[in-house]
Image (tube, rainbow, N blue to C red):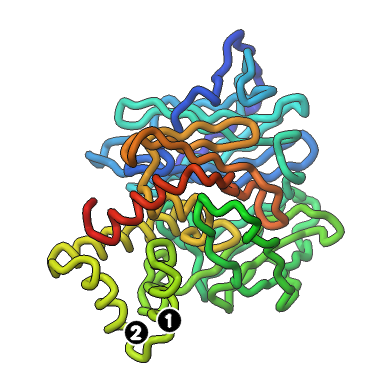
Amino acid sequence: MRLLFILFLLVSTFRLTAHDLTKENFNYLYNHDPVKIDYQIAQQDSLYKLVLTFHLVKVLPSDKLEGFELSQQKKINSDREQLIAPIAMQVDSGFIKNEIELSFYASSENNYLVVKFSFLDKQYLFGIPINEALAFPLPDIIYRSEEEGLFYGGLKKLDSIRIEDMDEDDPDNQYYAYLYEDDFPAAIPPMVVDGIELSELLKIKQRVSFKGGLAFNEADHLYFIQKDTASDKGFSILSHKEHYPRAKKVEELIETLKYICTGDEFKNLNQSEDKKLAFNNFWLSHIDDKKLASETIKKYFRSVKFANALFSDYKNGWKTDRGMIYIVFGPPERVARKEEVEIWEYKTFGGDIKFTFAKTRNLFVQYHYSLIREKSLNKAWFTAVQKWRTGDL
C-alpha cells in the first residue's frame, strides 16, 4: 500500500549532539541481519531527491520500519546535526521491498545525510555522503525499474529502466548510455603487495542516445548513463545473466574458485576437457567425505551468491576486494566506517585481524573500496583458505 505525504512547510531543527558514525558497527549491512539498504540520490542546486530501498525480513506480516528520521551533518563524526523535514515524501511498503522517497533541501556546508530508523526493536543508522564527501558531483537524474532484484540491485538482460529527471521544465530530455563489456579481473590475495594490480581500463563498446527509458540488450555489460556528456556526473548499472547472483555454469563455478585454488589447480581446472568432472575431483581430492564435500560446496557458492548481491558495483561482487574477503572469511564481525576507509574485523582466524578498504575514486561509482594489502595477512589468509579446502568450517 502506498501512502503519500506532502509537507508544505520546511522546518529545520538543530541538535547539539549528532551521530558519530565512526563509532557505529555497520556489520548489519553484510551479515544475515534482517535489514539491507540501498539508495539513489540526485541533486539540483540545493534540492535533493533521495530514494531509499529497504529489504526487510519480517517475522510477522505486521512488522514494519518505524521511527524514520533524516538529518544532515557537516562531518562523519560531527558534534551537531540538523533534522530535515522533507518538502515531499512517499512511502511504498511491501512485504520485503520497502521504499521511502524524499525531496528536501540540504545545506552546502553539510557533507553527510544520516538515516535513522528501527526494525524489530533494533535501531539502525545509515550514512550517505553529499557535497564535499563525494568523489564527483551528483547527477540530477535517477532511474526507476519494476524489477525486484535480490536485496536491491540485480538488473538483468532484457530488464528496462525509465529515467526520472529533476528538471521538470524539459520532460523531453536526451540521455546517453555508454556500454562497456564486463572484462574486469578478480581481486588478488590480501597479502600480495608487489604491484600486481593494474589500472582497470575499459574501451567503450557502444554509445546510445535515448529518451525516457532504456532496455538492457546485453548481459555482462556495464551501462554508464549520463544527461550531460561534458561532465563526470552519471550513474552506472551492471546488467547480469538471468541466474545472477548465483554462479550456475561450470565455467562460472570454476572461475570463482580462484581464491582457494593453487595456481596449478586453477590452470588444470580451466584446461580440463571435462570441466564438471574436474570440478568434482578438485573438491574430493581435498575432502574425501562426499557428504562433507557437498555441504562445503553449497556453503562456498552461497558465499559467492551473497558477495555478488552485496558488493556488485561496476563489476561483479565476487571480483571486488570486499567480495573476496567476504567469500573466504565470511561476514565481518565488526565494520567501522571512517572518512576515507572502511575497516572489517574478525576474531576467528588465529587472532584478531583487520582488513582496511580505502575509498578509491572511480569513473563509474562514487566509491570503489580497494583493500590495503599487507604481507602480515598471509597467515590468516592461509588458515581461512585451508578451512575451505578441507571442509573444516
Image quadrant occupied by the N terminus: top left
Position of residue 169 in the picture relative to residue 380 (left or right): right
- Residue in view at x 27 percent, y 84 percent: 277
Q: How many marks are shown on the rendered structure?
A: 2
Badge 2 amino acid? Lys
Residue 300 x/y as whole percent = 31, 60
Q: Is residue 132 visible?
A: yes
Q: Is residue 326 left or right of residue 225?
A: left
Q: Residues within 10 Å of mark 1 (few under 14, many from 20)?
A: some
Tell me how far mark 1 sits from mark 2, CA to CA: 7 Å
- Residue 270: which numbered mark, if any? 1
Q: Residue at x 68, y 72 (%)?
A: 179
Q: Which mark is residue 275?
A: 2
Label pair 1/2, CB-CB below 8 angstroms: yes
Q: In terms of secondary structure, where does tag 1 sit?
A: helix
Can residue 93 be seen?
A: no
Amino acid type, mark 1 = Asn
Q: Residue at x 45, y 59 (%)?
A: 308
Relative height, residue 151 to residue 335 (above, below): below
Dot 2 falls on a residue whose secondary structure is helix
Which circle's residue, 1 or 2, is located before the other in the chain?
1
- Label 2: few (<14), some (14–19) or many (≥20) C-alpha neighbours in 10 Å: some
Which numbered circle lies on residue 99? none
Q: Is residue 55 above or below residue 235?
A: above
